[in-house]
Image (tube, helix red, strand yellow):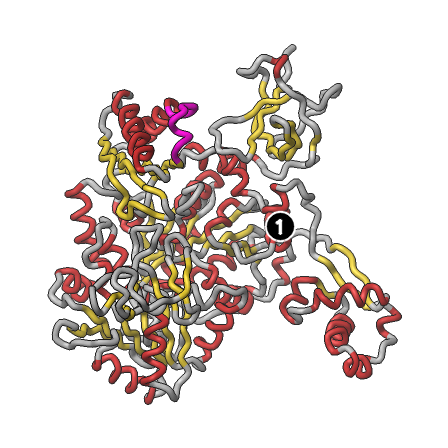
Amino acid sequence: MSQNNIISVAIDLPLFRLFDYLPIKNTQTLPKLGCRILVPFGQHEKIAVVIALNQKSDIPRSKLRNILKIIDKKPLLNEVDLWLIQFTSDYYRHPIGEVVASALPSFLRKGKSLTPTLEQFFITNKGNGVDIKALYSKAKRQAELLNTIRESTEINSNALDEKLPTWRRQKKILLEKGWISSKLSEDHGLPNVEKINTKPGPNLNSEQRVAVESIINKKGFHTHLLDGVTSSGKTEVYLHIIQNIIKRKKQVLILVPEIGLTSQLVEHLINRIGIKPVLMHSSLTDSERLLSWRMSKNGSAPLVLGTRSAIFIPIKTPGLIVVDEEHDTSYKQQEGLRYSARDLAIIRGKYLNIPVILGSATPSLESLKRCDENFYQHLKLTSRAGNALPPFMRIVDLSVNKTKDGISEQLVLAIDKHIKNNGQVLIFLNRRGFAPTLICNHCGHITECSRCDSRITVSVVKKSLECHHCGSKRPISYKCDECGGECVPLGQGTERIEEILSKKFSKYTIKRIDSDSTRLKGTMDKALALATSGQSMILVGTQMLSKGHHFPRLTLVGVVNADQGLFSTDFRGSERLAQNIIQVAGRAGREKKQGEVIIQTEFPKHPFWNELFSGGYHQVARFSMAERKAAGWPPFSHIALIRADSHNREYTWKFLLNAKNIMVDSNIDDVRILGPTSAPMERKAGKYRGQLLIQSNRRSKLHQILQALYTNLEGLKFTRRVKWSIDVDPIELF
């Protein structure tokens, strides 16, 4: 009788295949699906994950090697997890070993144990006998740590991280002195939800009530689009439904597009539901990520809150998936495994037979179309919660009202007025740095990156010229590279706007919030705390501030350069511009005072502004939808991008031409192949980039031709000269 003793495993390699092995030598012990094993690979040893057990292999049995070690007795990944990994690999045309690696925390990829890493600390009898006051005069840090542990019956490392950021330096000393002891904590399963201190929120309005009841009363899988204007109370709807799910002893996965959105939502969840969610995002340490992963897997975390990578986290008792700000492009991974966390959330919810909520004030056109087709339930919140009024929006015509520093006189006067009325101001500019580039006063030469077809960005704070595309830096020089003349900054970035406002409003606290100013851990939370409290009277920021945040005192939003998206080469340009403006405008006037939004533009008569002001975001969406349908662009078709880059332009083009010929020869109907063509930014980081666009009205045909492409490309020698990728459902065309 044949046995399923061929062990097929995924290894973290850029290869679209599984690797077959035999059991450990002289044994018949088989690992379970989803377990990690150690295998020989060439002259090395690698960590692998068991994907399947088979009777046969394409490789002769005599040539198969034996596995070396079974690392896990119990599977790390269950049937659902493995299915999601396989689906992701198949749909996004990405090597399954790299998908598995994306789904596992770093420690697990390195073969470390899933044993909890959370330490519990206890005071010893010796520690209780220490004179704290005397110790404070000699060793303040030691005294602080000892006293903190003494005042708690027991305290863990996470709690100490919050109370005493420097405690780890003193821990070893206290342990050596015998004043404290420690042990690894054990989880105790899902908390007793009957004892969770849930608090009632404000009374729901009729639209919120309909939304809550519609979602709760539907059994099994459904996708619900919660389409609510800014400040309409979408979070309240989430909280009511989450309370219901947790009472059923089920877990909830909440996805947010950016780390900066976690702090306020965490506060809401703690205050209302009485549970601190487990976090999963890139700013966590490896130990923290492992602990979060483990708690979600064993069911001891009722709430999991994370960014896009959290879509792969295992969940023991899934009950609900929430995707907040579902339109946000941050849900699409742009490098490596190019997946959409929003789309995978829907796929995962369907497989688990649980509800999925997509929330946004500016839903994506893809989601709106699915509502029109009755695949999603469209739930609308049309008015702001409480008595809050929608902001008053007006345009400042920069073609008439000229400005040298990027801020019009009308905007300056409005800022002054709102501050004097004790209001807070947000100036929005989606471009960090001091200025987009330098220009020579003598010859007009514009300073560019030496490695990219892009202008260099001036950062006065860092005293450097930086390329935001390749990351290259060099010291600031105001000497022209061409003629030696004097260069001056051209245009505005957030740094420059901050400097200008600091001169005009020197009496007030101004806070810049962008990816440059919030790089260090904890700086974003501190900046948002100052903003929320109103201590920072003027905020200057990028789209990091445009969504999800609640600033009670904010009454004025100024959009400095609204024209960036008006003439975009991307077919999604108008949709994204409208989303940005509506989202940032929605930060204003969320409580008692009505907000005001001032938009500066050189093109006030552009049709886009009429659409936006006459019917809001959904009017822009309707016009954009009609244009897309006429042109055959998504969501009325399905597309994929074949990207290639090389230090040699010839190699890039040769690869793309060969790829096109392979697809043409496959003779698959209802598919258009456009290109090859150069990427909009052809040279990036010293490499020449090109692309092919594949388009089809049928998703099945698109994937059929992609399969034919990869099957015929794999193993060809010329492919080794280029770096290439397949991007299914791309959101950027460059």
Q: Quadrant of residue 672?
A: top left
Magenta segment, prevailing SS (helix, strand or loop): helix
Whether 716 is among the magenta residues is yes
Q: Residue at x 19, y 46 (%)?
A: 628
In the image, what residue type sits under mark 1?
Answer: Leu
Q: Position of 476 compared to 568: left or right?
A: right
* Percent x, y of residue 701: 29, 28
Residue most extreme to the top: 1
Whether 718 is among the magenta residues is yes
Q: Quadrant of residue 159?
A: bottom right
User: Can you say whether 535 is above or below 169 in the image?
Assistant: below
Residue most extreme to the front: 484
Foreground pick, 244 / 20: 20
* Percent x, y of residue 397: 15, 73
SS at circle 1 = helix
Which residue is under mark 1? 290
Camera sees residue 222: no
**Magenta region, residue range:** 713-722
Camera sees residue 360: yes
Q: Position of 600 compared to 510: left or right?
A: left
Q: Which image quarter holds the N terminus?
A: top right
Foreground pick, 251 / 514: 514
User: Can you say whether 354 is above or below 527 in the image?
Assistant: above
